[in-house]
Image (spheres, rainbow, N blue to C red):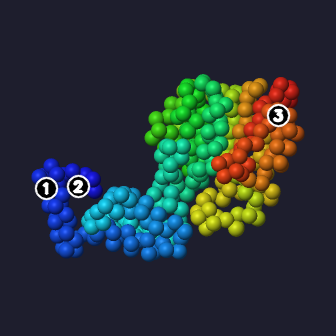
Amino acid sequence: METRDKMNRENGLNTDDMKNRAAQDLQGGAFFACRDVYEEGAALLEELEDGRLDARLLLEHYCGIPAHRLLSDPETPVRAEDRADFLDAVRLRAGREPLAYIIGEQSFMGLPFVVSRDVLIPEQDTENLVEEALRHLEDGSRILDLCTGSGCILLSLLHYSNDCVGVGTDISSPALQIAMQNADSLGLSDRAMWLQGDLFEALPGTSGSTSGSEEGIADNDFSRPEKYDMIIANPPYIRTDVIGTLAPEVRCAEPRLALDGGEDGLDFYRRIIREAPAHMVIGGRIMLEIGYDQAAEVTALLQEAGYYGIEVIRDYGGNDRIATAVKSIKQEAFS
């Protein structure tokens, strides 16, 4: 819409001329006033808590009309085909399809990430994990991101650090394709590589490892480190019996594989905490996103495994969100 205004100005049309032309367009039936289109969509989303906000965001995405334009010039014309696309998207949202999946993008750490139903939608809570990791990350560090999904954690760490490289693993090949796409769009493909497999089994030399080249997942020419300075993960941690109680947007749309943490929600923590020392340098740091009620259990697992410097960090809402610890010399003897 801004481009159309620019063309009108270049053709010598002033603001009054443009409004008159818009009125003619509306009367001709080829266009609809953006206010009417917005209200039509908002009415379909009235049962959603943030329905009017979602309608505004969808209007901007499909019709190119931001909120300030909707308020300042409600007669701005919307093409019939754009209105149709907008209403199709609104109906998807009314059916509880997550907004990010409809638009195909989610902002995380100030960066745009492509998302699809193959990956979890990056959440603001996870930004706490990235911010805390950046406090400990040194230039040139080697990072391993387990259950990488869209790659938002690893790619954010690489974007906001200097000379770090990283490997992201995931059991899902479609998820890794999304991560590759995000790495490319952020200009980080030369600092990240993606390996398919179940947690550490994706790494070369481990049982079940699958190289990137064999599965069509992007590979890079820098040497794969045998040991990492940081291992980070936002693993599935929701108890199996709780998944059915989640909001429809989560339980029906997001991949269950990325949600289900087993009977007590701790299945992935047990494996990661037990196996991580074999892949970390002495003094390397493990960082885990945890559920609000899992701090005691995860801390106990870290203690039993011989880590030191164990901390639990709360998110901005005051909930326990991150568990972090450091690999000890004692663990090296058993790695």
Between 195 and 105, the residue placed more toward the observer is 105
Lateral position of residue 94 relative to residue 169, left or right: left
Q: Residue furthest front?
A: 72
For the residues carrying marks 2 and 1, which lies nearer the camera in this image?
1
Residues at marks 3 and 2, CA–CA distance in whole angstroms: 61 Å
- Residue 302 visible in the current orientation: yes
- In the image: residue 242, left or right of residue 145: right
SS type, badge 2 = helix
- Looking at the rendered structure, the kind of residue marked 1 is Leu
Above or below 221: residue 320: below
Residue drawn at 73 percent across, 32 percent down: 285
The amino acid type of the residue labelled 3 equals Tyr
Q: Which residue is mark 2?
A: 4
Q: Residues within 10 Å of mark 1 (few under 14, many from 20)?
A: some
Looking at the image, tell me whether mark 3 or mark 2 is earlier in sequence order. Answer: 2
Q: Nearer the viewer, mark 3 or mark 1?
A: 1
C-beta proximity under 8 Å, tags 2 and 1 = no
Residue that label 1 marks: 13
Residue 307 numbered tag:
3
- Residue 70 falls in image quadrant: bottom left
At 63% from the left and 44% from the top, the residue drawn is 128
Q: Is residue 197 visible?
A: no
Tell me the distance, in whole angstroms, between the alpha carbons under discs 2 and 1. Answer: 11 Å
Q: Position of residue 236 (x, y in %)?
A: 70, 52
Whichever of labels 3 and 1 marks the residue nearer the N terminus, that label is 1
Image height check: is 198 above or below 74?
Answer: above
The residue positioned 25% from the left and 69% from the top of the image is: 31
The N terminus appears in which quarter of the rendering? bottom left
**Within 10 angstroms of label 3, few (less than 14), some, or many (20 or more) residues?**
many
